[in-house]
Structures are given as C-alpha cells and as structure tokens.
Amino acid sequence: MEDTAIEEAEVSGAAEFAPALIASHPHGNSVAVAIGPELRVFDLKSGSPVSLSDDCGSRSHADAIRAICFSVSGALFASAGDDKLVKVWKTDSWRCIRTITSEKRVSAVAISNDDLYVTFADKFGVVWLVTLGEDGAERVSVDNKPVSILGHYCSIITSMKFSPDGQFIATADRDFKIRVTLFPKNPLKGAHEIQSFCLGHTDFVSCIAFTSMSENQSFLISGGGDSTVRLWDYINGCLLDTCQVRDKMGELIEQNETDDSSLAIAGICPSNDGKLVAVAIQSFNGVMLLACDLVGKKLSFLKVITMEKSYIPTSLASSFSSELLWTVMGASNMPNQASTQLLTRLRIIPRFQKDLISSNNGPVILEDSEVPHGEKLLLALQGSLDIAKQEEVLASVLSALKVSMHKMLVKKHYSEERREQRKRGRNDKKVKN
C-alpha cells in the first residue's frame, strides 16, 4: 500500500519534495531564503526586509524554486525552478532584470565570474547559457535565447559552480560523476573542452563547492549519497582524500534515534579562509565540521554541532566577509501542504573560520535574540516568529527530510505501463512559442 501511495504521489508531482534554500551575499550585504515559490530577502546593511520588483507581480516564481545563487561580485542574484523560469535580479535594487524561459524544469543555476553570463541546467542534464550584457546591463538583444553549451546525457545535474578564477565550470549529477569543463572565451559556441572527470562517488553527487588556498590554487569539494565528502584536484581529476561521514556518525545516530541509514550529504559550505567545511546530512539534526588542510590535501573530522531534534538543515551558506554560517530548514511540495505552511527555520553558527577549531568560548549556535537584526530578520525569512508552535508542520517536514535525497535522486525502475503513465502526467513538455 505504501509503495502504491508513493507512486500515485509521484504521478501527481506531490512527491517531488523541494528543500528550503539559503544564500548569503559574498560581501555580507544580504541573505536570501527560497521556500516553495517564495523568495525572501533581508538587507543586512539597512536591517530591513527587501521588496522584490518584478514585472510579473510580487511573486517571484509560480512553482518551487530549486536553485539560487549570488554572483561573485554580489551585483547579481539568480533564482530558478519548477516553473521553468530563470530570473536574474540586480541586488542594489532587487529588481528582476531578466526572465528566461527553459524548455524543462531547472535543477541548477550559476552566474559567470564576470557577470556576463548566466548558466542553468535542466532536468534532462543539459546546461544552457544566456548572455546578460556588459556588467549585467539590462540592454540585451531580443533574440538572446538560451544556447546549450554542454550536457550530462539525460542525467539530472544536481550542482553547478564556476571555479574561483572563472576558467572552469563544474557540474555534478545523480550518476555519480563530476565533470569539469573549460569555460571558453566565447561560450555561445558551446563548451566542448572537458578538463577532467572527478570519479569516485558510488552514489549520486548532491553538492559541490570550490575552496582556495591562494589566488592561483583551488580545490573542489563534493558530497553525495554515498555518505562521503571528497577533496579533489579538479584540474587533473584526482581524488585527494575522502571523509566517510557514516563512520563518524555511528554513535550520534543511536543517540538521536535516527532510523535512516543512507546519511546522504545534503549540503557543503567551505569557510572563507578555506580551513573548514560545514556539512549538512539529510537525517541529522546538526552540522558536521571538517578541518580542511589544503597544503597536506587532507580532510579530517573536527566536531559535530548538534541542534534540537526538530531541526535538520536543508541548506548552508556563508560569505567572503562574514564569519557566520547560515543554515535553514524547510520544505515544500509535500502532500496536503497549504501555502500558509511554507515556513522555514533559521539557525546561525558564529565564528565560522579556523579559530573555531581551537575555540571553546562563546555560543556555538546563536539564540534567536542574538541573531543579527533579531525578530525583524527572523520574521522576514522564516515567515513566522512562532515556528516552535507549528508542531504539525515541523513534524511533516522533519519526516520528509529524513528520506528526501534518495527519493529525489536515486533512479527508479518502472514497468512500461508506469513509464507511459508518468509521461502523461508530467509537466515538462516543450514550451511552444
């Protein structure tokens, strides 16, 4: 009965769980949270929530947002998702300067380091590119349509990032692989030169991030459904080190009565000094911290910051100029979930830098009263100040989070009849102009 219910939910699209996302402005100017179709932004400089300006109305998207990111400069922000729209925002005014229509639902988005291009990946594994114009200018040609530049051959791309020097674009997928591609000077002609494949994960790759030890040397970090965090020499496609999260979580799993055995990595976030890596794990109420020795090319377990049992982070974020690690918990697209239940919960960890390795003083997690701008920020980004009272909503989110990654990314095998049924019910058919 349970399998049948899940299959029926998948046909209707209700089982396509969408985790809450968080992104921090690289210079600490603002923080953005996406939950369902809602994009919530708080200006940390003025201490006030941001009103988004969009020609389509006050609502940023019509369906669940699957990917958000700031550009390296912080001048631009991109959001994309199940409504097949990619929106580019100028962060000085938070006005949408470009809306791009994709033929398929979008799973990842990134902005080139020079702010000239936005790339996005659809659910069929194709990466598309659109020109934004000089310095993100609003004047673009009317025929500036998305151009496909590379593909993962029908494998969902889970994460996409530009390297710190902007020379490469890394893409990860659910078929265990990471592709590193040279980003050409004229990408409109396609990105055909593969620099390397980073192969070693034994399950889907859920997230990737770059970290640097200098302007001229950087590394790639990845996390996946095989419960590992891996450090790569991405130029040569060499695996440098692997941290087995499962081995470090054994005792904590028993203590917290976690019944999920997969321990998929839900998110990773390097500190701005490159010395730490924060890891979110799909069924764990807390964050694991790894020490990252880029000289010795090693990852090592440092500590676990445990949070309340009702809090499992779905996304992590930090910035170049801030020592705060932002975490968010939330979910949408769950069965019988009302739009009024699109609540998120924030937790912030201070001193997210190498000093945290040896420091035993001060708060490990900020209390709500210690959060920057206090209740104003929490109300704007969470949707409510009384999250703890929403026990039924939190319980359903918590239950979904414990199995979310595998339900979303592990390939399912269907009979011919089920495949035809899914085709008839899908909403990703080609858009007709």
Image: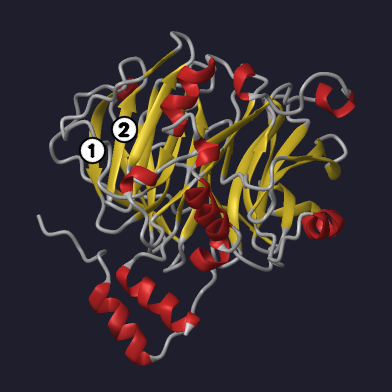
**Distance between the alpha carbons at the discs numbered 2 and 1:** 7 Å
Secondary structure at badge 2 equals strand
Residue 210 % position (x, y): 63, 38
431 up-or-down from 3: above or below? above
Q: On the rendered structure, is 49 left or right of 242?
A: left
Residue 99 — which label?
A: 1
Q: What amino acid is at disc 1?
A: Thr
- Given residues 232 and 426, the one toward you in this image is 426
Label 1 crowd (10 A; few <14 / some 14-19 / many >=20): some
Residue 88 — which label?
A: 2
Q: What amino acid is at disc 2?
A: Val
Q: Are marks 2 and 1 in contact (CB under 8 Å)?
A: yes
Residue 103 % position (x, y): 24, 57
- Given residues 11 and 227, the one toward you in this image is 11
Q: Residue furthest bottom?
A: 416
The C terminus is located in which quarter? bottom left
Residue 432 in sight: yes
